[in-house]
Amino acid sequence: MLQRVYDWVDERLDITPMWRDIADHEVPEHVNPAHHFSAFVYCFGGLTFFITVIQILSGMFLTMYYVPDIVNAHESVKYLQGDVAFGTIVRGMHHWGASLVIVMIFLHTLRVFFTGAYKKPRELNWVVGVLIFFVMLGLGFTGYLLPWDMKAYFATVVGLQIAESVPLVGTLTKTLLAGDPEIIGAQTLTRFFAIHVFFLPGALLGLLAAHFIMIRKQGISGPL
Amino acid sequence: MSDEQNHNVSRRQFLTYTLTGVGGFMAAGIILPMARFAIDPVLQAETEGDMKAVTDVSELTENPQRFDFSYEQVDAWVTSEVTETAFIYRSGEEIVALSNTCTHLGCKVSWGSSSDHPNQFYCPCHGGRYEKDGTNIEGTPPTEPLHRYVVEVREGTVYVGKAEPQV
């Protein structure tokens, strides 16, 4: 059945070469854990992406109940976690995944660093990777405020004070992030929400695309 | 693909099956909680329209009278007080409670407010009219009778439930 649907589409659109291009490529022996178990270190990039997909999915579902507004934010989080079926699990996925993605991206960075995979001709991909890391940190920072509880609020107070301590542009940066030079409140929450669900994920998807296109173009770096 | 007669599972097929199986299991583990989370409103047990106390039975007459009643409405994390209006009268042994929402476009009707038709429900928006029992009058805009509340009398107090269509 599935095969026939595929054949029907393939006959008209010739999709086989397309997905071959994406999925069908050689995995060298030195990165295949079936050959050398220690090659599992090459999995961290893929795991980072896997968790990122979970983050995007669980985040999409959370916005079905979440309200980015100082009156309702905390109540809506409480409701979706306490009263909606599987709310604890879906929020838990997003909560723990957020930490795990940072762990995975860090391990991936260590592997790239210690195998020297960042060297010529792959310097650009290292740069893009570092940008992805910053975007991830940004997602963590903005997402932390959204539950609008005490921990979220005061963590953001501290975070914004750090931003403010930057010479020359500090105050400007803080106002830009918080939406107000003094208050961390209504405007801060909506801003952080917009940054968290639209701007940074948009940037992330673009950077990930660049990251993957480059690795397909250049291939996986050689063995040590 | 292996030929039709050969029922031995090839190494490639075995891997395809096991990997698809494991992959499918993992994907299901991720997707199912989210799907259940998303469709929760559909599966919420319908709050079997609580009956709300409106008035004493002794207050009722043969003529429809306006009664306002309020109740708490719980909408996820928001609880608010909602006020509804019913026209209630006695019809022999029976107690009839009609909704005041016009079935034409949802304006509010009232009893006998048109001096030309003192014994009908009248809607000021487009002149819709209804008989005392809620039946819409031919030639006026409404296309169905006024909705009728489920009524219950407990210890001399009139309770109403949900307003339901009469047809």
Image: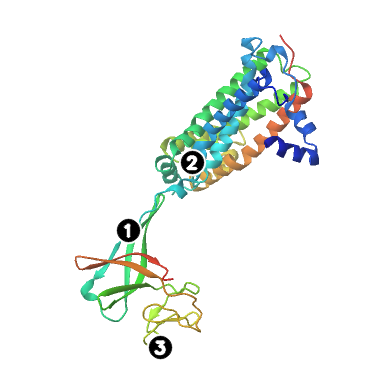
Q: Position of residue A172 (x, y in %)?
A: 60, 40
How far is disc 1 from disc 3 in space, using C-alphas? 35 Å
The answer to whether residue A189 is above or below residue A19 is below
Horizontal and vertical percent position of residue A193: 55, 43
Judging by the rendered image, the residue that carries numbered circle 1 is B50
Mark 1 closeness class: few <14, some 14–19, many ≥20 residues within 10 Å: few
- Mark 3 Cα-neighbour bin, 10 Å: few <14, some 14–19, many ≥20: some
In the shown orientation, is residue A125 left or right of residue A102?
right
The CA distance from mark 2 to mark 3 is: 54 Å
The residue lying at 22 percent from left, 72 percent from top is B57
Q: Dot 1 lies on which element?
A: loop
Q: Position of residue A112 (x, y in %)?
A: 67, 17
Nearest the camera: A215 or B146? B146
Q: Amino acid at mark 3?
A: His
User: Is B154 situated left or right of A213 in this image?
Assistant: left
Q: Earlier in the sequence, mark 2 or mark 3?
A: 2
Q: Chain of mark 1?
A: B
Q: Which residue is mark 3?
A: B117
Name the residue rendered at 67%, 26% in the picture.
A129
**Numbered circles on residues, count:** 3
